[in-house]
Image: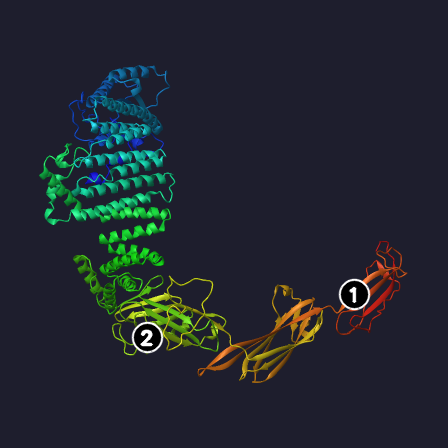
Amino acid sequence: MSWVSELPGELVSRPLGLVALTGLDTTYNAVHKAIWDSFCNNRRPDRVPLQFKVCKADHEYQKCKQKRTSYEWYIPKGILKTNWMHKHLHDIPAVVIVFFDLDWDEPLWKEKQMECATRVEIVRNSLLGRNTKIAVVLIQKNAPLPPGEDLMAAERAVSLCSSCDISAKSLYVLPHTDHLIGYTMRLENAFYEQAQAYYHQEARKVKSHKDFLNKTTHQLLFVRHQFKSAFFNELKQDSHTAIKHYKQAYGYILDLRMHDTNMLEIKTVAGFINYKICRLSFQHNAPLDAIAQFRKHIDFFKSKSGIPELAFEHSAWMSKQFQVFGDLFDEAIKLGLTAIQTQHPGFYYQQAANHAVFRKQLCQGLCMHPHELKSADVVAEYLGHVEFYGQRKWRQGHQSIEPPDLQVEREGILALQTKERQVDHSWLIIPLLSSAVAQFRKYKSPRMKRFLMVQMGEEYYHAKDYVKALILLNKVMWDYRGEKWWKLLTSILDTSLKCAYLTAKVQEYVSNCMELVGRCSQCSPDEKARIQMNLIKVMSHKSPDTEPGLDQGCIEKANASWAELLSHPVIFTIEMHGLIPFIETKACFGDEAVSADHKVTLEVCLRVGCPFPVRLSKLLVLFTNQKYNPHCVTADRLGISAASENEADMGDLYLRPEEPRIFCFSFLPLSEDVGKQIEISSLALEMGSDSGCCAVLRWTGGGGDNLFQPTGPTRPVIKPHTPGTPVDWNAFIVNPVVRVNARKALLEVKLEHEPPCLLNEVYSITAVIDNKEDCDIQDVRLSLGIQESEENQDNSTQVCHDVSGFESVTPLNNCHMELGTIKKGQRVVKQFFMKCLLTGNRTVVSTVSYSVQVMVDKHKITCDCQAEEQVNIVTVRPLDVSIKLESMKFETIEAVHAEDPFLLTTDIRCTSPWPIEMKNSYIELSEFIHTACDEFESQIAGGKIVTFGYNILRREKESRSSQRV
């Protein structure tokens, strides 16, 4: 059925005018070989659209048939001959070029001229009756002189044209020089013009036949002639005229009388013409015209199925129509056309795949009768080359409504059905689906992409490529789980389970079984029970029972693979994140936070939703800090298929359907995790045994149903389960993290001081420590300093435990002191000193860290504790000093004059709550100002200033400077 499945290569290729080159010996003549290479090699897009063919000088071209002078009694046998396009593309040239080695100064000119004329005559006789153009190219050694300078060349050219009976425009000279490619391209342009003239003449000749036709008996010829005219215009590279003729041909074909005997021929030629119209429309940047034409084409022919026994042919034809249009659409997009999400090639590939699937179904319904199948010889007799596209070999040229021989017709139909049965339809469907998937992925349609991938997986399954089917189906199941398409997911899992069984993939088989027996599966109870029994068999290191609906040959191979696989231990891990298995897990810490001297409690809740009880081998809780892992392990003592002996035993991992069970663990936090979090990295359950088949089921984090967990801003309140009460699965929350806080320190720290602190004062702070613990404490470390903030980054505060420390080169804003061991009930008092260089508020923090041994469940552990006390200290100035200028009459002045005496009055106010004793005072003056007396005597030395007190100093000054002060 090649006329249905494939388009001819001559139809889909770009039509190029054929130019035959004769007289070139490309085997033994290097010059001729170089000329041929210049024509056919490295043909860039900017060169003229021609194809070249080397022919011998005596090549026999196809003979021209005698032209019909009247169509009065002519009855056409078909629409389009199968060899017509090939003939005009590859056999009948538009131009024949005769190459001949001849220089203008050839001594034996007459003999050479005669030989050239003879060659031209041989070609002309071979093309007798055709309009093919003939030209002569003289291969010369030297470049020609400019026109008019070589008189001998002009004379001999006229003589040669006369001898060869060609026009002067058909004589060319090709110098074999370094610029050969340039001369070749000029020759190509000349050949192209002659080829266009030839195809134009051929199209006019076909058009002239229309006057002899009538629409009663020559309907097929109207289609044929329009198709030929269009094809000749394509060869002429006149695509606009070509598409006009193709559209006329398509209009004529829709007017044909259609019946079962000629339906396939009409659809075949209509498909050819539709292909040409759509392709040229895309080339003309008219995609809407192409889409409209294709829709019109499909709407008209979609119901023209033809012979019912060969209905699969119609589906094959429809599939091909959609496929080739998708290819044309995709090619146009690659050349710059912009597609949108609702109109792109993917939809056409999808429809092509749908028709291919329907073809497969029709084949299964029509061609599955073994007693009616024919042998290969009979099939070859009824199938093969035909004269006209779309006709049956056993009744070629027959155009009547009824077949000529019903028995032969029946035999031919059976031969076609036999041939169709040999087709592996899955390998026709899969490439179409793959193309559609690529397009829907490109245009961001994820659901359509997944839907088509499921179809691809099923086709791989039907094609018995079970590994690829398994890979594809596993890729799409994640999305169907997340979107809760349970019915679709169940169907996919069923196919995936069969693929896993047939390929003996234990891990995939077990994971599929776990999902199919779960509560979200849409399988029947009996089917779930069967699948769970197979799961138990596999985990017991036995081969599972055969899946229903499988081919017997595949079953035997699968049984052998399972036997070989289970001959040695099998251990594998299944990541449960995103799966919907029959077993569910949740883990919850008993508290949000726990003290370092208290145990961490953890509850793990397990639930199964399968038809029968399940026994697990081991339960493990894995933490980010692996040192906790040994504390949270529960192992079962019995095999997977054994019944429970003691269900009350918490070490027994025997789970009944829909009866959640809680397993409790507790452990002490490590000192290294104080101030950090203890986090569950994963939960693991083991099924089976290490010596046989063992599946490790692993949930990330605290388990739970990752697909359904609520993601709100509020965190549910943890409510530990009360022993002896029923377990509410929905109320059991997942909490995989617990924070470990330091043990509360039983130590009192007080800071004693007398505020405020004066600027630059050595301020005393006393730290008082009282041990309230029940025992001695060790490694006591006392520190006192300023709380770190952006305001105290300038080192304006100094702290030390000795006054002499302020004299160090690098004073610090904190001080540490090791106290060693403090007895039970003991009080320790330590003094610190602080010096503030700037005023303002400061927060002084005193921290005492120590270690103490405590008893927890008869275990002695060492805890690190820390007590802290902080106070706010205000730093103020001890004195406020102000200075003003006065005249000798005690009047306030703003400026002083040179050589004029004035008074400098100083006001000192005490802002300290305590009296301040003044040891000495002095004034620093500029070099231009001098006191009235040579000696300066302090007026307040040895005095005392109390809060809000004032002391006014007046000094008479005399300026001896020439400048204004």
Q: Residue at x 9, y 36 (%)?
A: 405
Residue position marked by numbered label 2 in the rendering: 635
In the rendering, at what x and y percent does residue 836 appear? 68, 69
Quadrant in the picture for residue 938? bottom right
Disc 1 secondary structure class: strand
Camera-nearest residue between 624 and 298 = 298
In the rendering, at what x and y percent does residue 498 appear? 24, 59
Camera-nearest residue between 590 and 813 = 590
Question: Mark 2 vs mark 1: which is more N-terminal?
Answer: 2
Asked whether residue 870 appears in the rendered view, the answer is yes
In the rendering, at what x and y percent does residue 664 appear? 38, 75
Camera-nearest residue between 42 and 260 = 260
- Is the residue 919 above or below the residue 331 in the image? below
Foreground: disc 2 or disc 1? 2
Q: Residue at x 65, y 73 (%)?
A: 800
In the rendering, at what x and y percent does residue 478 appear? 34, 58
Neighbor class of circle 1 (other Cα within 10 Å; few <14, some 14-19, many 20+) is few
Residue type at numbered disc 1: Val
- Is the residue 514 above or below the residue 350 in the image? below
**How far is mark 2 from mark 1, CA to CA?**
84 Å
Quadrant containing the N terminus is top left
Colour setup of the view: rainbow
Contact check, label 2 and label 1, Cβ < 8 Å: no
Residue type at numbered disc 2: Ala
Residue position marked by numbered label 1 in the rendering: 881
Quadrant in the picture for residue 272? top left
Camera-nearest residue between 373 and 888 = 373
Which disc number belongs to residue 67? none
Quadrant in the picture for residue 730? bottom left
Q: Residue at x 16, y 27 (%)?
A: 75
- Residue ranking furthest to the right: 889
Neighbor class of circle 2 (other Cα within 10 Å; few <14, some 14-19, many 20+) is some
